[in-house]
Amino acid sequence: MEKSNFSRQFEDFGIKMYVLAILSIVSIFTGGFVNLVMFIIMLLSLRDIKEANLELGNEKLEKFRKYIIYAVIVGIVGALIIIVIGVIVGFLFISALPGFNISDPITVSEFQDIAPLIRTLLVVLLAGGLPVGAVALVLLMSAWKHFHMFLEGNSGLFPNTVAPKAIEGSGTIKKSYLYLLISLIIGAIIVLIAIFTFPQIEKLIIHFIEETQPSEELLGGTVAVFAVPVIAIAVLGIISFILMIIGYFRLSELKHL
């Protein structure tokens, strides 16, 4: 029996989810280029959803597609803001550390001159880039929530061996974005702490520039304030990554329609 357009499109979607799962694992060892390929494949998968929905006209399926597109647009803006500010701030801080100077070593007075700029950039990051990134993640969570609801409400359209795994996969991916959102919130807290403790950070950087030993209280206190949230972000990021891979593999069962 010839398969319907709906089945063919969802099979193609499932195949792309399988490719995304494999590429996610590969990206651990490669990075940049593979992530770009994954981004393109994800966008192509939305075309499968659009074609499949021509027969159904399902609102939740359409919201899944649109919300991901909105998230991509918003996310690109937020990522650019975060990356640009992060690179600038990181470069300014690193240039003050011994052994990391690209040109002539920075002096204390030079660092004090650029310190207000660093603090201003942190404020812009907190007020601009991070909220935009949070909006993008909320849109992605909402998108996968609608897809999850579609699969639950229309499980009869899929074989019994496929539907439960696909439903689980969509829920798992939604959960992975929740962990990323929590990570972003913790990141915002780190930036906020950096803004309020900037005088102490400035003193610590000056010690590095002068190559003098900061007090244990100053060094230990600064490290303690930032160590826990940074570790939390790393752990949440790993959990999110694992859940994303599991979710893609579960959704790839759709290729067996």
Image (cartoon, rainbow, N blue to C red):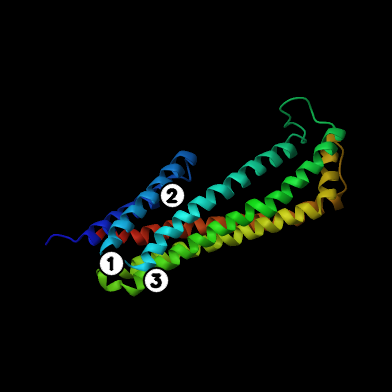
* Amino acid type, label 3: Met
Q: Is residue 3 left or right of residue 40?
A: left
Q: Position of residue 150 (x, y in %)?
A: 36, 69
Outermost residue to the top: 104
Category of crowding for the residue at label 3, using alpha-carbon neighbours closer than 10 angstroms: few (below 14), some (14–19), many (at least 20): some
Q: Identify which residue is drawn at 33% across, 68% down.
A: 58
Mark 3 vs mark 1: in front: 1
How far is disc 3 from disc 2 in space, using C-alphas? 25 Å
Kindly identify which residue carries mark 3: 149
Kindly identify which residue carries mark 2: 24
Category of crowding for the residue at label 1, using alpha-carbon neighbours closer than 10 angstroms: few (below 14), some (14–19), many (at least 20): few
* Amino acid type, label 1: Leu
Q: Identify which residue is drawn at 60% across, 62% down.
A: 182
Q: Is residue 196 left or right of residue 137?
A: right
Q: Earlier in the sequence, mark 2 or mark 1?
A: 2
* Amino acid type, label 2: Ser
Quadrant position of residue 153:
bottom left
Which quadrant: the N terminus?
A: bottom left
Quadrant position of residue 6:
bottom left
Q: Nearer the viewer, residue 46 or 226?
A: 46
